[in-house]
Amino acid sequence: MSRGGRLEARRRRHFRLRKGVSGSSGRPRLAVYRSNRYIYAQVIDDASGHTLAAASSQEADLRGRSLTVDTASEVGKLLGSRARAAGVASVVFDRGGFAYHGRLKALADAAREAGLDF
């Protein structure tokens, strides 16, 4: 019997990761989802269930670009500035079961440069 595949393996990694990662009002969770075409990131307060800031590569100024490390970096800068504007200085990083490498790492590094503390 098959155990699923790549998607199911990522889901298992994500559930395993989320057991120890939770966002609070003092330190919300920065959740990242990456598809083949787009990357999405949001800062979430898990205690109240609210999204405090969000950015994605589907936004108007980034829509025409393909998903590269540079595009992911732009999304990270955008998210970092929006989170700082919402009063968030420190976050817990939730990589969503994806490897911390390439586009995901570029987004995280850009968010750090924009003023977020991981």
Image (tube, helix red, strand yellow):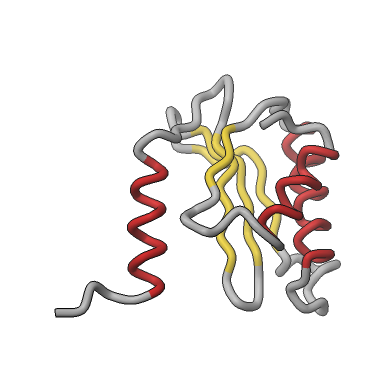
Q: Is residue 19 above or below residue 62?
A: above
Q: Is residue 118 above or below residue 41?
A: above
User: Quick one: 90 or 50, which is closer to the camera?
Assistant: 90
Q: Quadrant of the N terminus?
A: bottom left
Q: Quadrant of residue 106?
A: bottom right
Q: Position of residue 70 (x, y in %)?
A: 84, 64
Q: Quadrant of the C terminus?
A: top right
- Please name the residue shown 82% across and 48% down the image: 77
- Please name the residue shown 33% across and 57% down the image: 12
User: Is 5 on the left or on the right of 95, as rendered?
Assistant: left
Q: Position of residue 114 (x, y in %)?
A: 84, 39
How many numbered marks are there? 0
User: Is 30 on the left or on the right of 19, as rendered?
Assistant: right
User: Is 8 on the left or on the right of 112, as rendered?
Assistant: left
- Please name the residue shown 62% across and 31% down the image: 91
Looking at this view, name the residue that lies furthest to the top.
Answer: 26
